[in-house]
Image (spheres, grey):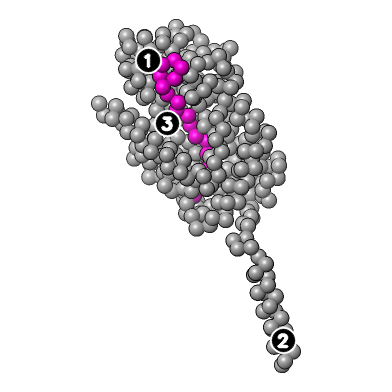
Amino acid sequence: MKSLRMSAFVVMLIVIFACLAAPAGAEWKPERPVTMLVGNPPGGSADMFGRTIVHIINEYNFSEQPFVMLNMPGGAFTVSFAHLRDQADTHMIGVTSSSYFTMKITGNSPVGFDDFIPLAHFVQDPSFLCVPRRSPFHTLDEMLTFARENPGALKMAGSNPYSDDMIICEMIVALADVDIEYIPFPAAAEVVVAILGGHVDLAMLGTDEVGEHGFTGDIRPLAFSSTERSPTHTEIATLTELGLPIAQQQSRALVMSKAAVADKPEIVAYFSNIMAKVAETPEWKEYVKENGMVELFLNAEDYPPFHAQLVEHYTQYIGLALERERR
């Protein structure tokens, strides 16, 4: 009997020392492949952003489990956001878009930013204001002069309603005192088709979206929407330089379902740490440079305050767009 008591005592000590040795909040690790969910078709800017991150993670073996891409287009990203929220999956990460903020603000979707936990912010992605090569406009001033003389005659294409593209259009309308109609398309590829086909007069396109058609091809950029000129195309002036103080840039970031990780900070920390490693790789630096993006990495601790600023910003400018629609 004494031997049994002694054995039980030894076992108890082993358990106690094991608990003491284990760090508080031991590191969480994924048990199956991790899904990177994006709400547009393959080839769009958001898709390439997520796909680049997935490639780097897998190439460097930053995770114990592989990352896989899942494209779920529809409803200006609301289909993918609803899926991300409702699945409440600890192994699923979502790529944000401007509609991540705006659809809830406009009341067009029951899903919105308050359903998610900010995970990591990577870059700000400016756009070029473009015209087709056959356009009579060779400068921003020529386009604005025509717009003032012909109210409502010009049509500008952009990706999705209530997006950064629409906000830029609304800013141009307000600051230049012109009337330009914004035409939303489900994806950037369709915006390219619309401007090449002559269905619209203007378009907002990212560096990767202009692609082979731009700069020396069939699309002519008139201005850049960042605070500084594109590092890859320094010959294109910014809207601010040309007299319109506009520096609207889409934030490229990642989020997770609040229902999945709100009470699991160790999961958020795990993925946030991986994303910090991605942001330091030469492959990521090259991707950012090639696409004329502005690097702004924020981890899960630093991103929420900036996230709150973005909510305030989008609320302000979408409010202006809605007011114009009601007029």
In percent of width and height, residue 317 lies at 36, 31
Q: Magenta part of the protein: which range?
A: 240-257
Q: Amino acid at mark 2?
A: Met
Q: Which residue is mark 1?
A: 154
Q: Nearer the viewer, residue 119 or 64?
A: 119
Location of the N terminus by quadrant is bottom right
Outermost residue, right direction? 3
Q: Determine whether, in the image, residue 102 is placed left or right of residue 60.
A: left
Nearer the N terminus, badge 2 or badge 3? 2
Q: Is residue 242 magenta?
A: yes
In percent of width and height, residue 87 lies at 50, 51
Marks 1 and 3, Cα distance to the nearest angstrom? 19 Å
Q: Which residue is mark 3?
A: 163
Residue 195 appearing in the image: no
Q: Which residue is mark 2?
A: 6
In the image, residue 36 above or below residue 269: above
Q: Residue at x 67, y 48 (%)?
A: 63
Q: Residue at x 51, y 13 (%)?
A: 220
Outermost residue, top direction? 136
Nearer the N terminus, badge 1 or badge 2? 2
Q: Amino acid at mark 3?
A: Ser
Nearer the N terminus, badge 1 or badge 3? 1
Q: Residue at x 57, y 43 (%)?
A: 36
Foreground tag (2 vs 3): 2
- Disc 3 packing (10 Å; few <14; some 14–19; many ≥20): many
